[in-house]
Image (cartoon, helix red, strand yellow):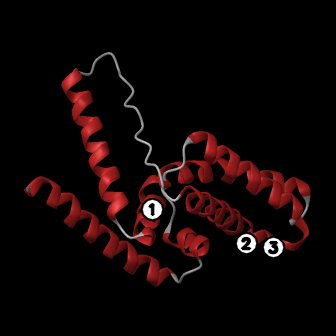
Amino acid sequence: MDNELMYRLINLKMKQIQRYLIRLGADRDVAEDIVQETIYKGLLYIDSIHEDKFSAWMFKVALNHYYDLCRKKKRMEIPIEDVAAEGNEAPEELFLQKERREEIERVLEDLTPIYKQLLIMKYELDLSYQEISGLLGIRMEMVKTYLYRARKQFQKKYGGLHDE
């Protein structure tokens, strides 16, 4: 793969990978470090990575690195993004938004890891079924099936919070 093509691919994917890692639970600095390490590995193995597999390869390397760090820490931390205060929003509305966000984070943490990954890839990163299939190395039909199950599990758990 030529260097210019790799440079363009890296620029396209690095922010997306960083957002994905943050949604999985990495803080911004850790996500940035993982992305840099992934780029470094991409440069090391540039001759052995096929162009059409490069994006999936980068996601996989970043994800594996993140999981390695989590295993070392023995726990994953959930970042709760601060709600940006806009001048025209009431404090009550800001509080409710933050509370909803925290509930969603708790429900996502309760899901099986594959369901959490799929929901984040589909609804946070706006990836297509085909892109998700390529990144995770599973058939597109399985992506659709797992996403259906993930949505059902999410709805059940999220609804259960409000039934109590």
Numbered disc 1: secondary structure: helix
Image quadrant in which the C terminus is located: bottom left
Residue 67 on image: x %, y %: 58, 63
Residue visible at 70% across and 62% down?
58
**Furthest-left residue in this view:** 163
Numbered disc 3: secondary structure: loop
Residue visible at 15% across and 61% down?
160
Q: CA distance from mark 2 to mark 1?
A: 19 Å
- Residue at image mark 2: 53
Q: Are marks 3 and 2 in contact (CB under 8 Å)?
A: yes
Residue visible at 69% across and 51% down?
35
Disc 3 crowd rating (10 Å Cα; few below 14, some 14-19, many 20+) is: few
- Residue at image mark 3: 50
Disc marking residue 122: 1
| Viewer-side residue, 6 vs 118 | 118
**Label 1 sits on what residue type?**
Lys
Residue visible at 28% across and 18% down?
88
**Furthest-top residue in this view:** 87
